[in-house]
Image (tube, rainbow, N blue to C red):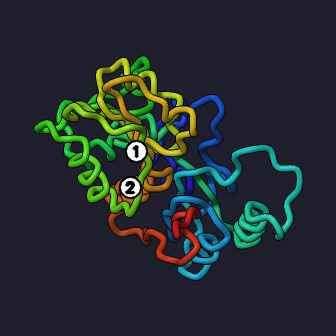
Amino acid sequence: MKVREIVEVIETFAPLSIQESWDNSGLCVGTPEQEVHGILVGFDCTPELVDEARECGADLIVTHHPLLFQGIKRITPEDPTGLALIKAISSGIAVYAAHTPADKVLAGVSGAMARRLQLDDIKVLAEEEGGIGLGAIGNLPAPMSCQAFIEFVKRRFSLQILRTSKLLDIPVSRVAMCGGAGSSLIENARKSGAQVYLCGDISYHHFFTPKDFMVMDIGHYEGEVEIVDILFSLIRKNFPNFAVRTSAKPGTGNPVHYY
C-alpha cells in the first residue's frame, strides 16, 4: 500500500481543492509513493502521537489539524512542532491532515455536530458553489426551552461546562454550528434564523448578542473531535484488512484542561 492510495480515499471524501486559502491541509511530511504498512488516526500530530505511531508500527499518521500550519523558522526538539517533525522524519512516518476540507463537507465536522444534536433538515451554513462550505444548520425535532437545550448539548457532547451569551426567553428550534473556531460565521447563523449558534473559541465581545439570538462556546476540540472516528471509519471501510487504529495514548487528546 502506498500513501497516495490512502490519500485518494480521504480526498474523495474531502477534496484538498476545497480547503480554505489560509489552511495547510494535505501531505505535510513524506511522499505519495511511500510504502504504508499501518495507519494511526489522531486529532493533532503531537510528539506523543508520533511516538504511538512508532510503537504500533504505523508509518502514516492522519490527523485533522495540520502539523505545519504557520511559518516555522527553526526545527528544534524544544518546540512541540519541531519535536514531532524530527520524530516523524527520522522514523520515516508520513503525516497527512484533512482539516478544512473535512470541515466543509456535510459528512464531516459540522455535519457530525448537527447529527449529534439529532437535527432535521441539515444544510450547510455558509454554502459555496457545489454544496460545500463551513458550518451547518438544522431544526430540532421539537422546540426546547433554552435551559433544556443547554443540558441537552452538554449531554450530547459530554461537556462538564460551556460558555453562553445571555440566555434566551424563547424556545430553541433552529440551531447553527461550526466545528472549531467559528466566530466568523456568527452573522451567518443569525441571518439564517437560528436561535442558537454553537462553535469554539468565541471571544469576549461576541457574547454581546442581539435579542432572540444566543452564542454557545462548547470548545474547539469538543466540536471537532468526532472527525477522528469519521476518518478512521472511512479508511477502514475502504481498506478492511489493513492495520488502522485511532490514538489512545495520553497527550494526544484535548490540549485544553479545565479545573
Q: Residue furthest right?
A: 74
Q: Position of residue 203 (x, y in %)?
A: 57, 39
Q: Secondary structure at mark 2?
A: helix
Q: Is residue 228 left or right of residue 74?
A: left
Q: Is residue 67 left or right of residue 44?
A: right
Residue type beneath disc 1: Val
Q: Is residue 79 left or right of residue 207?
A: right
Residue at horizontal 49%, vertical 38%? Answer: 101
Q: Are marks 1 and 2 in contact (CB under 8 Å)?
A: yes
Residue at horizontal 29%, vertical 35%? Answer: 168
Q: Position of residue 144 (x, y in %)?
A: 16, 41
Residue at horizontal 52%, vertical 64%? Answer: 254
- Distance between mark 1 and mark 2 Cα atoms: 7 Å
Task: Tell me, yes or no, if residue 5 can be seen here.
Answer: no
Q: Residues within 10 Å of mark 1 (few under 14, many from 20)?
A: many
Q: Residues within 10 Å of mark 2 (few under 14, many from 20)?
A: many
Work out whether 95 lies above or below 244. above
Q: Position of residue 162 (x, y in %)?
A: 41, 53
Q: Is residue 146 left or right of residue 160?
A: left
Residue at horizontal 43%, vertical 55%? Answer: 222
What residue sits right under mark 2 in the picture?
A: 226
Q: Nearer the viewer, residue 138 or 55?
A: 138
Looking at the rendered structure, which numbered label has been put on residue 41?
none
Q: Residue furthest bottom?
A: 55
Q: Nearer the viewer, residue 259 or 232?
A: 259
What residue sits right under mark 1 in the picture?
A: 109
Answer with the quarter of the image where residue 159 lies: bottom left
Q: Secondary structure at mark 1?
A: helix
